[in-house]
Image: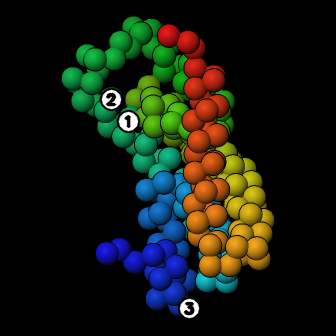
Amino acid sequence: MFPSLSALFAKAGAAPAIQALVIIIGTFILEDAATILTAMEVQTGQVALPVALLALYVGIVAGDLGLYGLGKLAALWPAARRWVKVPQDENGGNWFGRNVFRIVFISRFIPGARLPLYTACGFFGASVRRFALAAILATLIWTTLLFAVSLQVGHFLITHLGAWKWAGMGGFALTILLVGRIVANVRSPSR
C-alpha cells in the first residue's frame, strides 16, 4: 500500500528538500489537491510555510511550462500539423501570441482548460517568455488564494473534527473540484 502524504512528510522530517520534492511531484498529479493537502500539512506543522509555497509555485509553473513544451513538440510533428488547420497567414499563432496573458489567466481558473490551451499556446508559437510570465503571475494569484482558504479550512477541521480532519479535507477538495466542474459546464455552450 502507498504511504499517506502525512507519512511521507513525517519521514522527510527536517529535510525540507525532500518535502519540497514530494509537493512538486504532487502538483504534477493534481495541483489543486496538492495545494489543499499541502496547506493541511502546514496547518499540522509537518511542513514549513515557505517550503510549502515555494514548492507549490515551482511545481505548478513547471507543469504549465511542460504543457507549453508538449504543444511546441507537437508542432514539430508533421502529422499533428495535418490534423490541426493552421491558417496560412499565421493568424492563429498571432492570436495566441497577442492573447497569451488572457488565455493563461482565464484557464488557470477554469478546470480542464489548461491542458488544451497551454499546449495550443506552444503549438501556435506564443512567446515562451510571455507565457512563462503569465503562468508565474496566474499561479501566484490562484495558488496563494487556494492555499490561504485551505489553511483556514484546515485550521477549522483540525480544531473541530480531530481524527476526522482528513475526511473533512477530502470533502473540501471534492467540493472545490465539483464546483469547478459545475462552473465549466454552466459556461460551456449547450449542445
Question: In this view of the protein, can residue 95 be seen by the observer?
Answer: yes
Res 14 label: 3
Answer with mark 3 or mark 2, whichever residue precedes in sequence: 3
Asked if 83 appears above or below 21 in the picture, the reply is: above
SS assignment at label 2 = helix
Answer with mark 1 or mark 3, whichever residue precedes in sequence: 3
Cα distance in 3D space between marks 2 and 1: 5 Å
Cα distance in 3D space between marks 3 and 2: 44 Å
Res 174 label: none
Expressed as whole percent of the image width and height from the top left, the position of residue 190 reads: 55, 12
Amino acid marked by disc 3: Ala
Residue drawn where x is 58% and y is 51% of the image: 174
Q: Which residue is mark 1?
A: 72
Q: Quadrant of the N terminus?
A: bottom left
Res 75 label: 2
State the residue lying farthest toward the top.
88
Residue drawn where x is 64% and y is 31% of the image: 183
